[in-house]
């Protein structure tokens, strides 16, 4: 038995806290008893052999990987040493351990979508989601692409309750709420922005500016600069299990633009209806509808999107959030993944919005759908949750058959993203700076998540918590309650607290609830915000 | 008589070289004899009174303004002193002269579009354009929005002649040419990129990063950050004679995006056909066509776009380049301006692409159409020709009735431009750094323009030069010649020289020609490139 296993068998708190690493999607639970060192060595060796870790890649610091896996540092050191002995990696003290030799990446045959070896995720701790809040038999509101917001009853028609008022203007309601001043903002979707690595950014920009040629300042490749497309493939290989060629990557101005470009290309290809998750992101739905696509709601239950309903709906594409469903936090389970990819293999197009998959606290990483069936999955991600939304920078991976059309759409949208930020991000990804930043904010986000959970238990009686194992937000529902959650959100806003009513993100009716972001503010502020929400709740009951 | 006038009356070379200033569109030719100091003082006082120069604006250094106007420094110093004596400006040594007092900007009544007091520009020196190369009676090729490029005969179907080959792919031909390697690039549209102010940019970014709040890193205003919208209005007031409120400015990712957003909004408003100049920018036309608008060619002659033909064409909007028509370099004259604004007052929408108006060498500045009739003119500009295309940053001013729709289009396009570059540009505009840069590159561009003119005289017999008084490119035509200009461009590319055949930018046929950019390379390279073009020309004849 490894010494690390002895350590682990004591049931240390550390092992409980983290059950896997983003790096190569390692889950120590898959290691055979008594063979963890061998297992880790083999996994890294396989990643070098298949090109996931090309020559020049840096391995995580032993200390960091050990902490994430919940094993001893000695175990990781031993695995690295075995790889060094075989001439595959080179340890250079503080400069880290780098891959120095490996076969050229072979052409890997496309995985067969079904039967599929996706691990079935463990049940989500703390926040079990049993039945869907709205079953398939629930009455369906008539589709009203832009007008449906107007039908939401309000808790007040003037003053601070403005965004929740019945007469919502055509401007998106989320934007309207964003413009209202408040003391405590619990809107979802924003990471800890005080942690933005200003110094690292500026240093990288200095190097970028010093190294640019005059031609680099001219009109560039609308698909994105090759340096960033290569850095993104490295990032996705290390952190999301995705093998991709830089030529499959289109640099975009965030997931919002990715959806706009795809909407255009889908319409060009004759697709008029796109399935969306219900509940699901209001913003994403509006993005597709502005692109003149009809959205078809498909229910989400405790296993993720209802694939039978998807099939019955007859849409040509589906937009979904499989790693951490927005807003419920559900993980798409293995059975549903198999069914979904079978649907894609039969001609459907999957659009995977991997919006916050890097943020998780007490569950193993979930592999991206794109990793399993690149031919049928468009994959969109961005730095909005990693660094800052204001950078407007992300990536879109598309199947080969759509690539030229998507690049043309990007070309006519804006001739490509600005060059400086692309090259700065490439440096931060290649140097390991972005991974360091992610580890730092993840620790902070976890403490904030814990603070919010304690505050909800104390101040929101009757609230059921969903999806708290990962991400930057959680969802609460008040099952069986008969108030309108827009009234609750309006009451909270009157007390200076912003939160999204769950009904904003629903298409068909269901239990009232709230979507609560916990990443942006310090624990004390979160607790105060939840206490004020509790006061608003008390006034409704 | 002022001492400056005595100086000027000697016919100094300086006075010949520059005949006006971008600052307040000052043209010393409008000053009464013997009253230049009074005239300059009055013009600045009026600009302070009407809010063009609000409190806090900095006046140009006396030395700089004197050089631009071709007057003595003493004259400018005297004018500034009179304003200082009146308490309106304050000279602070090296810190410059700043407006310190002035009435609050009054609401200025909208100018009546007709009759219109636009000055008739002086005839363009060196490059008189007499009759249009293709008169209104010339036979019209059938409209073929994307396919017409394929009909251009080629000088070779493989190898370096690829972009000029008949089987042009659906990807824009200009992009295809951009991707071909070459030794000397005479493509139009790129300024001197070696002059990019890297140090100033990095210093501004350091200050921006130090000053940002955490909230600034979140989702921002899709219309653009208020600091940049205010800086753009100051820039346009000082340099383009445009009075605008920051609320009228939409920050965009360059003119290409501006046209894409407008195409969307025009279609939403029922406009299906947009008139374009012929010859005119191929790229701009493709941008509108990708936005599902039909483009209607309207001939350009020596006075600019043919407004009678515009009226007859029945389009709902027109895209044009009035200050320096692309590619002919013609300035829209006063009579045509009156007719155009009359057409706009009757319901037509003018889209003014002010793509390179800041660059001029031996003619007075031409006021923007937007300055004359804001209710009927959309105005688009960018830093692509001021700093670098790779920044993807520009501005769009729209009439109030279209503002909300354009902001919504921008919102759904990408949620707004990235914040850092917006704030850096605002600093460069507010500090005067951008004006300094413009003055620097303008001197360089003029020398390059002169080198190209000499080289054309030496190496391109029979070439007639058009539009060399301003901008970053000139046009040559070979009137009466019977070769295809695509064959000439292909022959030049085989010798390592890139240039645009004029026929790319024509819709109806006309004389063969070339569009030649002179700003990007040093004089020796330009001369070599023209000599090689001459060799390619000799092989055709």
Image: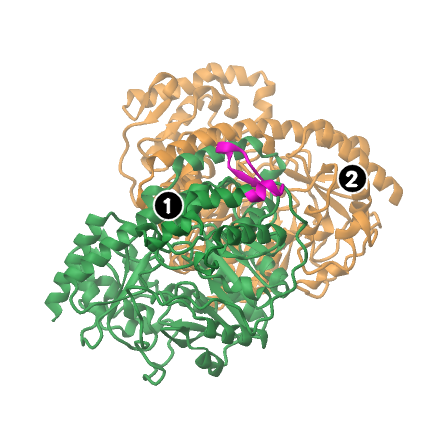
Chain colours: A green, B orange
Q: Which mark is residue B236?
A: none
Reading the image, the residue beneath label 1 is B225
Specify few, some or many for label 2: CA neighbours under 10 Å numbering under 14, 14-19, or 20 or more.
Answer: some
Residue B426 location (% of width, % of height): 41, 37
Relative to the observer, which residue lies in front, B47 or A297?
A: A297
> Please, which chain is the residue tagged with disc 2 on?
B
Relative to the observer, which residue lies in front, A378 or A390?
A: A378
Q: Is residue B351 above or below residue A285?
A: above
Q: Is residue A246 above or below residue A398?
A: above
Reading the image, the residue beneath label 2 is B496
Where on the picture, by quarter, is residue B98?
top left
Q: Secondary structure at mark 1?
A: loop
Relative to the observer, which residue lies in front, B535 or B327?
A: B535
Q: Secondary structure at mark 2?
A: loop
Residue A535 location (% of width, % of height): 12, 61
Relative to the observer, which residue lies in front, A119 or A31?
A: A31
Q: Of label 1 and label 2, which has the lower sequence position?
A: 1
Q: Which stretch is magenta?
A: A82-98
């Amino acid at each position: 038995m490894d010494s690390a296993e002895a350590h682990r068998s004591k049931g240390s708190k550390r092992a409980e806290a983290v059950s896997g690493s983003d790096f190569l999607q390692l889950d120590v639970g898959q290691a055979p008893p008594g063979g963890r060192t061998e297992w880790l060595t083999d996994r890294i060796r396989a990643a070098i052999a298949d090109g996931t870790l090309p020559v020049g890649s840096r391995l995580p610091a032993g200390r960091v990987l050990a902490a994430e896996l919940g094993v001893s540092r000695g175990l990781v050191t031993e695995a690295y040493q075995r790889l060094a002995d075989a001439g595959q990696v080179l340890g250079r003290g503080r400069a880290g351990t780098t891959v120095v030799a490996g076969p050229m990446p072979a052409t890997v045959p496309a995985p067969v979508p079904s039967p599929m070896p996706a691990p079935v995720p463990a049940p989500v701790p703390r926040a079990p989601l049993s039945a869907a809040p709205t079953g398939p038999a629930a009455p369906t509101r008539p589709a009203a692409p832009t007008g449906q917001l107007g039908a939401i009853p309000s808790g007040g028609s003037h003053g601070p309750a403005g965004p929740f008022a019945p007469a919502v203007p055509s401007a998106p309601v989320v934007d309207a709420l964003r413009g209202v001043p408040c003391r405590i903002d619990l809107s979802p979707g924003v990471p800890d922005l005080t942690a933005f690595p200003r110094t690292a950014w500026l240093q990288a920009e200095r190097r970028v500016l010093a190294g640019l040629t005059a031609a680099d300042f001219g009109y560039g490749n609308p698909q994105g600069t090759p340096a960033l497309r290569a850095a993104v493939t490295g990032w996705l290989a290390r952190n999301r299990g995705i093998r991709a060629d830089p030529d499959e990557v289109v640099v975009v101005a965030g997931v919002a633009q990715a959806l706009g470009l795809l909407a255009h290309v889908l319409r060009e290809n004759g697709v008029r209806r796109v399935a969306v998750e219900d509940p699901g992101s209001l913003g994403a739905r509006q993005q597709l509808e502005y692109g003149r696509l009809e959205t078809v709601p498909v229910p989400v239950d405790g296993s993720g999107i209802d694939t039978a309903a998807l099939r019955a709906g007859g849409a040509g594409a589906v937009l979904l959030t499989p790693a951490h469903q927005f807003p419920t936090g559900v993980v798409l389970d293995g059975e549903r993944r198999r069914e979904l990819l079978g649907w894609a293999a039969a001609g459907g197009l999957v659009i995977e919005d991997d919006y916050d998959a890097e943020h998780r606290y007490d569950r193993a990483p979930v592999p991206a759908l794109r990793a399993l069936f690149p031919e049928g999955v468009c994959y969109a991600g961005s730095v909005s949750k990693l660094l800052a939304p204001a950078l407007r920078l992300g990536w879109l991976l598309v199947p080969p058959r759509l690539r030229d059309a998507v690049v043309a759409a990007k070309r006519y949208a804006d001739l490509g993203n600005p060059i400086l930020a692309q090259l700065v991000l490439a440096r931060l990804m290649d140097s390991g700076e972005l991974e360091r930043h992610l580890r730092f904010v993840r620790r902070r986000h976890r403490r904030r998540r814990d603070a919010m959970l304690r505050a909800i238990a104390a101040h929101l009686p009757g609230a059921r918590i969903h999806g708290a194992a990962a991400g930057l937000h959680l969802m609460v529902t008040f099952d069986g309650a008969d108030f309108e959650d827009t009234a609750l959100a309006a009451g909270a806003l009157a007390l200076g607290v912003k939160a999204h009513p769950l009904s904003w993100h629903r298409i068909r009716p269901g239990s009232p609830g709230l979507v609560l972001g916990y990443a942006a503010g310090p624990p004390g502020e979160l607790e105060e915000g939840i206490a004020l929400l509790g006061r608003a709740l008390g006034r409704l009951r």
